[in-house]
Amino acid sequence: MTTFRRLVAEWRPPSLKLRVPWWSPKTAAPDPARQAAMAFPHLQQPSFLLASLKADSINKPFAQRCQDLVKVIEDFPAKELHSVFPWLVESIFGSLDGVLPGWSLRWLQGRVSPVEHSVAVEFLDPGGPMMKLVYKLQAEDYKFDFPVSYLPGPVKASIQERVLPDSPLYHNKVQLPPTGGLGLYLALNPFEYYMFFFAWSLIAQKPPPGALHVRTSDCAYFILVDRYLAWFLPTEGSVLPPLSSPGGPSPSPAPRTPAMPFASYGWHHTSLLKRHVSHQTSVNADPASHEIWRSETLLQVFVEMWLHHYSLEMYQKMQAPHAKEAFMPTEEHVLVVRLLLKHLHAFSNSLRPEQASPSAHSHAASPLEEFKRAAVPRLVQQKLYLFLQHCFGHWPLDASFRAVLEMWLSYLQPWRYAPERQAPGSGCQARGVSERWAPFVQENLLVYTKLFLGFLNRALRTDLVSPKNALMVFRVAKVFAQPNLAEMIQRGEQLFLEPELGVPQRQHRLFAAPSFTGSFLSSWPPAVTDASFKVKSHVYSLEGQDCKYTPMFGPEVRALVLRLAQLITRAKQTAKSLSDQSGEGAAGRPFLSWLGFYPADSNGSYAGNDLDEMGQDSVRKTDEYLEKALECLCQAFRLSEAQLAQLTLALGTTQDENGKKQLPDCIVGEDGLILTPLGRYQIVSGLRRFDVEYQGDWELQPIRSYEIASLVRALFQLSSAINRRFAGQMAALCSRADFLGSFCRYHLLEPGLSGRRLLSPVGRGHAASRSRGPRLSLRFLGSYRTLLSLLLAFSVASLFCVGPLLCALLLVLGYILYAVAMTLLTERGKLHQL
């Protein structure tokens, strides 16, 4: 400390150059100047420490800054570090006002910046220097302010209305603003403050300028989330691992304020004026609960900041038309939530078999084991359901929905994360779901049934020809086709739909508020053996008393499943048809069209999709996914092949005798063909289409991407001048009946004008009124392909010592021979038609 005070007295900004960190107590022997500095206790030492750290954050490289911070954390006491802590947290995760960008952990990748990535992860590791600083401050009972305005929407609205949220996380923490303050805030201990910022940075931090798309599993933030969950939600042992230190393990200090018992997590809203922090009585929690205070805090913070963006009232309002868009998570946000759910399943399933049942609850169990049993149903279930409902209803209809889908499927299958995890099967043939999971299925019935209905509605509006969409349908069908799962869901639905007989007190039991006092161990309610009551309690708590439940295996959902099966069959046919058309188009394209001498793509149309981008391999994958999805749907919903065949034929998906697709379903009206509702559906689904052709003046077509705009315009002006000057002579030549007339007609008349299919009578009238005479077209010379072909021909000719003039003559002679042959073939075809 003497060294530090001497350095304070001698400090002269802004450039102090030392070979060792300036804060080290062993940098030099004390001298009279430093000893004199000890006589001034009012000197603000932490302010000097903070100012120096801020200067280093600008001038020193990242790795050196972290190394210096480790030294600071080890050498300075909590009294001098507590003012540095808020700035350090903001410098890591970014400040709430956006001034400090932070370390950009979400964009820090190991394969791009391996040194910075490794240093940041080790510094913020749950057993690393930053957590040592947290626990050092935790022992002194320091408090730090977190503004309520940066909390999720429902929480912020509740607190601002002076109503305490239902989570015990906010108990004894909400503070009214001081005189001159701007708003409400939370008084948090160091661990809570750190975790709030860590969770907040996922949903609020903006990408740095020039940030590229990152692989989430490789970024520092995702790795830290994984490490925090593995550390604070352990699957082995009955206590959390202690914080390691050079001097041996030292347990983390418990918070001075007793933790809120779990009995309050369902406690009715109370006015903050009555339950303000300064007026609330403390809760006498059991001392044993201090073993898991970090686990409770971490999980509650993650759930509140990542999932609690929608309340039941907000969700019901969002169903109304013209509802204002609420918080929309990102794909990275969803991937992190999925990681949380996987850890939670592994954490809850790590209970020993004799402890897994609620009937095994006893005071002999450790608090951590009790927490394993209570974490998912009491902290996660409701908020996750509303989170998933919003994603299913508002996520774009594209392949990015795969992240939401996998998050949902991970929660649906806790058996995948059990110690006795079964080996995954291929296709729909997998081991059956054990009966031990029946209570989980029943207590999460809506997550299985109503979200499956939401997925059906999405799948019916997507293009199943796309391999990515086909894969998503297969993934869902495969999960619900697991043996015994459909039976479990049906039993759960039967329990919910059975009438209320002989239990008049159920309604009172369902909404009775739990006790507010007591320890964690005594707060766990007695096991409810009435399975029907548990299912009804789950549904009513998530959807409200007036909800209208649609059975998953009822006629309405079954009709949607049949419709999806029809779309799968159609998509398979469409994929095969598009593949055949692509092959035929490539084989039938004239060779000279690549050289620019044939009007390739005269219509400028493009009917492509994922298949065109990925090729034949995509067709194979799509067909495989759809075939397996259809098989799994038939297995889960007991669909017969006869049903599918009959419905497929009824909707007109058969092919012509020639194997080609028919035109869309339509009727003939006064103005031509009119689409029927079925025809519109066939076009939207990509099952059928009209052969759309350009019917206007070919010379006036829009300039294509493969043409030079300025050259096309110049050639048009030149050809127009020639046509005006020699119109009479060209008409006379084309009217001749000999070979010269045929040769001129082949070049000067638009090919196929009289043979085009004009499906609309209006189009026929316009075509009749705009008959054009012979004319010269030089537009083909404005094509990149034509110019490239000519350049290639002259280059090859130069290799054989052929001059440009001779090469040009040879090209003209070759084309004349080609034109003579085509003229003879054209005339012979006309004679056969007569």
Image: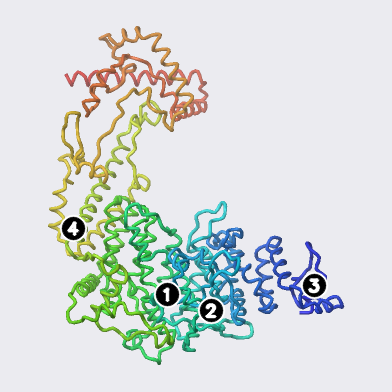
User: Are there few (<14), some (14-19), or many (20+) residues within 10 Å of tag 4?
Assistant: few
Q: Upstream in the sequence, badge 3 or badge 4?
A: 3
> What residue does disc 3 label?
7
Of residue 746 and residue 138, the one placed in the foreground of this image is 138
> What residue does disc 2 label?
278
Q: CA distance from mark 3 to mark 1?
A: 53 Å
Estimate the x, y position of residue 745 in percent, counting from the top left.
30, 15
Estimate the x, y position of residue 294 in percent, counting from the top left.
50, 79
Residue type, numbered disc 4: Ala
Q: CA distance from mark 3 to mark 2?
A: 41 Å
Q: Quadrant of residue 390?
A: bottom left
The residue furthest right is: 32
Q: CA distance from mark 3 to mark 4?
A: 80 Å
**SS category of the residue bearing label 3:** helix
Residue type, numbered disc 3: Leu
Estimate the x, y position of residue 782 in percent, counting from the top left.
45, 25
> What residue does disc 1 label?
270
Is residue 269 something that shows in the picture? yes
Q: In the image, is 717 to the left or to the right of 7?
A: left
Q: Upstream in the sequence, badge 1 or badge 2?
A: 1
> What residue does disc 4 label?
559
Q: Upstream in the sequence, badge 3 or badge 2?
A: 3
Q: Nearer the viewer, mark 3 or mark 1?
A: 1
Q: Residue at x 28, y 12 (%)?
A: 739
Residue type, numbered disc 2: Ser
Q: Residue at x 29, y 57 (%)?
A: 625
